[in-house]
Image (cartoon, helix red, strand yellow):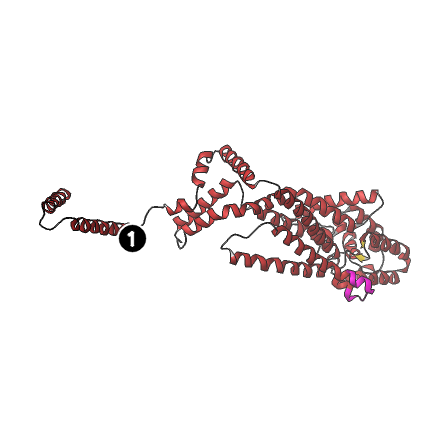
Amino acid sequence: MSLLTKSGGFLGPIATVLGYVMSGIFAILVAINIPNIGLAIILFTIVIYMLMFPLTYRQQKFSRMTPLMNPELNAIRDKYKGKQDQVSMQRMNEETQMVYAKYGVNPAGSCVQLVIQMLILFPLYRVIMNVPAYVSQVKDVFTSLAGQLLTTSGAEEYLKEIATSIQATTITKSFTENTIIDTLYKFRPANWTGLAEQFPELGSVISSTQKTIGGMNNFLGLDIANTPMNIVREHASVWLVIAAILVPVLAAFTQWISVKLSMAGNPQPEGSDQMAGTMKTMNNVMPLMSAFFCLTLPVGMGIYWIMSAVVRTVQTWFINKHLEKVDMTELLKKNMEKNKKKMEKKGGVTASQITQNAAINTKNIENRPQTRLERAKKLTKEVGNISDEAVQKKKDYRPGSLAEKANMVSQYNESHRKK
């Protein structure tokens, strides 16, 4: 894994941007004499989620609109139930999209926030694992020691020997200042002690470097570059073990609270028992997954995970309070009007076409064109009614009367006209 050679691939540019944000925040903390990476992660999380607030608001609005749209969406599904041909599926999709257009919502909008979170999470993992690559102030802490180790006899063999155990594999491929910094950033207390014993002539710079980076990485007694699992394995003090275990526990708990609050006030649609069951399972499993990840990843990732859930919870609470005061009917009208103008501006569909095509409800669907079987049943019923009426009329005339004979003549003429 490379440290000062930044992450590549399509996530590389995102990691670089996040690194600039992190570096800027850390520079401010350095200016006010609080050079702490854990605090920088907390402030970074708040900044990122404030920028994502519009997406969060749209997601919550979509959830509130869903119960209003469901009767029409369910009617469309019932209309095309059992029809798997391409034409029917295409028409069902078109009518469904028209309903979304009518209500002025984008069904993909609820997934955008999750995608963005993933696009942030993975590059952020690279930034937190390789802070010196993205935060120059942290890199500068190691520069002096790395430069001296680069020219010290026996340093290369010693560092390469312990590189595998601390997962600093870049130094095994090349021995440069950058790979030395990669290795030193992953050092644990025992590694620093061993380095000072191995190279006593560098004792003062080793001690200074350890103290400075230790202060930057220390958050409530925990080393943010270490994992909770490693802290527990290292048999540290009882309080450090408790603090390390609290990281995954708080990650799971805060995410569970966030999910519960986001679902509050958004009732599940009727007839969606299977979907509701799936959502419930996911809501219970995801916090457990968060606990596992935060147990095995660096404490810095756990801090981000916890803070992101806390910020989402606060945002969701305020959004729910705001939407409770909003007239959903009025909001619906505004969304519809906004979407109509958007569609007209694109030149695809006029406002009248959207309204006409989106007026899909149960009543419209019940008035669909009749099938051949339905027409045959209706014709049979009508013939039966006519026959019953003729029999009834025949009963109304006295046998042998003049009225009966006149009626017989009328029926004869009527039948010949139809022929």
- Of residues 218 and 284, the one nearer the viewer is 284
Give the prevailing secondary structure in the magenta stretch. Answer: helix
* Residue drawn where x is 61% and y is 50% of the image: 114
Query: Would you say residue 203 sits in the magenta stretch?
Result: no
Q: Which quadrant of the figure contains the N terminus?
A: bottom right
One can see residue 353 in this view: yes
Q: Please count the marks in the image.
A: 1
| Helix, strand or loop status at disc 1 | helix
- Of residues 257 and 378, the one nearer the viewer is 378
Q: Which quadrant of the figure contains the C terminus?
A: top left
One can see residue 227 in this view: no
- Of residues 163 and 41, the one nearer the viewer is 41
Q: Is residue 204 left or right of residue 302?
A: right
Residue type marked 1: Leu
- Residue 266: percent from left, percent from top: 58, 50
Query: Would you say residue 236 sits in the magenta stretch?
Result: yes
Q: How many residues crowd mark 1 within 10 Å: few (<14), some (14–19), many (20+)?
A: few
- Where is mark 1, residue-wise? 373
- Of residues 189 and 375, the one nearer the viewer is 375
Q: Is residue 396 left or right of residue 259?
A: left
The boundaries of the magenta stretch are 232-243
Position of residue 233 relative to residue 273, above or below, is: below
* Residue drawn where x is 79% and y is 63% of the image: 241
- Residue 338: percent from left, percent from top: 54, 35
- Residue 91: percent from left, percent from top: 41, 46
Q: Is residue 404 left or right of residue 332?
A: left
- Residue 234: percent from left, percent from top: 79, 66
